[in-house]
Amino acid sequence: MRTTAVLAAGAAAGFAYALLEAHAFTVRHAVVPVLDPDAEPVRILHVSDLHLVPSQTDKIAFVRDLATLEPDVVVDTGDNLAHREALPPLLHALEPLLALPGAFVLGSNDYYAPVAKSWSRYLRKDPRDADTPRALRRRDTESRVLPAGELAAELRRAGWKDLTNRRDAVITRHTHLDLVGVDDPHLDRDEFPARAPLPRGALRVGVAHAPYRRVLEAMRHDGAELVLAGHTHGGQLAVPGYGALVTNCDLDRGRAKGLHGWPGPRPDARGGQGSYWLHVSAGLGTSPFAPVRFACRPEATLLELVPAD
């Protein structure tokens, strides 16, 4: 009886901590040696997976304050919304960042609001069974539809590049960022753009919401040297010393968040070892039906691109 009570108390304390950690927003910093030898450093702010609901004033304030980091470019990898009324507060949160050059793709929770479901679903081998287009058609999707089109229009109006199955570019600090993106692979909406030559001296950067292997490989064959993605929440619930339990896609757990080489070791130079740099953001939010994080704080990341050795 006493053992049961101790275990129950420990579980309650862990759950209470996980509720608090979901609001412990932080900024990560990472250095990416990927530019030409004489290039000036470029600062990319990577934001992802806000899953915003109107009442989250602390998250809104944190996102607004990110502009003080003075990034050169902002890249948003989707899942900004989690409520049908969240667009105005989201635009308020992003307002200071929208004054900067930026690019974006959308995620499944920009198209459809999340629904309550068993947490065990995330432990299945193929977690997409909850969110595939076929599954969505089986539900009352009318009440779940989010204003993705309005969101994309507002971001484009601010000057951000829409990378929904298309290419574009941003030039900053004399560095040409040649951008390629896809719509959300988690919903099978990705259609990789037609091949295009890389402008001389440009750095090809891939952008996707969910880092499925098929997309990562397509970007490798396309000549990307840096790819940015989100979706995983870093596992959301992690075990200290072990890491993420799941990634909610077919990416391995070891790359659930942070900066890694893909598909092999970290490249030691531009295009070195046949690999590129992959950054997966753990994101800033959670589903409103699972508002917890454990050993995986919500984050935005400032990536400093510097010359490669």
Image: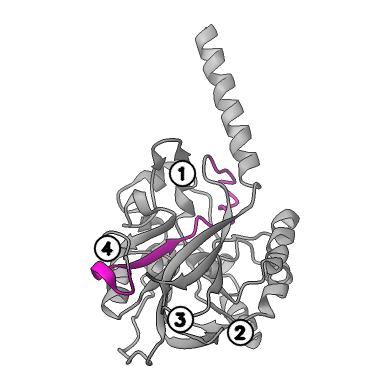
Secondary structure state at the residue bearing disc 2? helix
* Amino acid of disc 2: Ala
Residue at image position (46%, 43%) is: 119
Q: Nearer the viewer, residue 281 or 130?
A: 281
Quadrant of the drawing holding the C terminus: bottom left
Which badge, 1 or 2, is on the more N-terminal residue? 1
Q: CA distance from mark 4 to mark 2?
A: 34 Å
- Disc 3 crowd rating (10 Å Cα; few below 14, some 14-19, many 20+) is few
Q: Which residues are magenta?
A: 269-294
* Amino acid of disc 3: Asp
Secondary structure state at the residue bearing disc 3? loop
Circle 4 is placed at which residue position? 263
Per the picture, the main secondary structure of the magenta-coloured stretch is loop
In terms of image quadrants, where is residue 110? bottom right
Which badge, 1 or 3, is on the more N-terminal residue? 3
Q: Position of residue 131 (x, y in %)?
A: 42, 61
* Amino acid of disc 1: Ser
Foreground label between 3 and 4 = 3
Residue at image position (57%, 55%) is: 299
In terms of image quadrants, where is residue 181? bottom left
Which label was assigned to residue 118? 1
Foreground label between 1 and 2 = 2
Which badge, 3 or 4, is on the more N-terminal residue? 3
Do the residues under discs 1 and 2 have CB atoms within 8 angstroms? no
